[in-house]
Amino acid sequence: MHEMSLMGGVFEVIEQTVSQHKVKRVLQVKLKVGVLTNAEPDALQMAFEAYGKDTICEGAELLVERIDVLGRCQNCHYEFNVTGMFFLCPKCQDINIKVIQGEELLLESLEVE
């Protein structure tokens, strides 16, 4: 379950962030997760709870926003949503596609007290 290692990285960022401020506890964590990470929201939730146990994140709400895959054709520069992992430009039919969105795992925000 690679969600545990992904969440480990998230918690490193959370710890760095809250150490710079006077935070009693974290109430909410918002993540943006690209489809290409193959991270399942339920598994992320379980990993979040495991990492959060006995920390200032214990009991915090985790919100996960899924980010679709966006590609750009390197031939005609057309940008399009990639559906079904079909990396073919719908405009010129070229297969030289650059992924410009959908691989990210971003800590968007923290709500704290």
Image (tube, grey):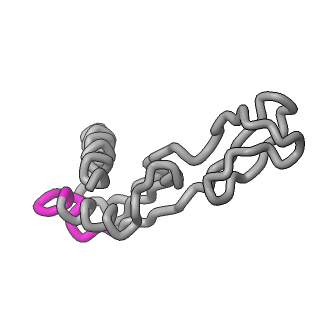
Residue beneath the point at 25% across and 53% down: 4
Residue 21 visible in the current orientation: no
- For the stretch drawn in magenta, the main secondary structure is loop
The location of residue 25, given as percent across then percent down, is: 25, 60
- Which portion, as a residue range, is magenta? 51-61
- Quadrant location of the C terminus in the rendered image: bottom left
Residue 65 visible in the current orientation: yes
- Quadrant location of the N terminus in the rendered image: bottom left
The location of residue 13, given as percent across then percent down, is: 32, 41
Of residues 72 and 52, the one nearer the viewer is 72
Residue beneath the point at 67% across and 51% down: 86
Residue beneath the point at 30% across and 60% down: 26
Q: Is residue 103 left or right of residue 98?
A: left
Query: In the figure, 47 relative to 72: above or below?
Result: below
The location of residue 108, given as percent across then percent down, is: 48, 50
Query: In the figure, 1 relative to 11: above or below?
Result: below
The location of residue 40, given as percent across then percent down, is: 40, 63
In the displayed orientation, state which residue is furthest to the top: 75
Of residues 68 and 45, the one nearer the viewer is 68
Does the magenta portion include 55? yes
Q: Is residue 29 left or right of residue 50?
A: right
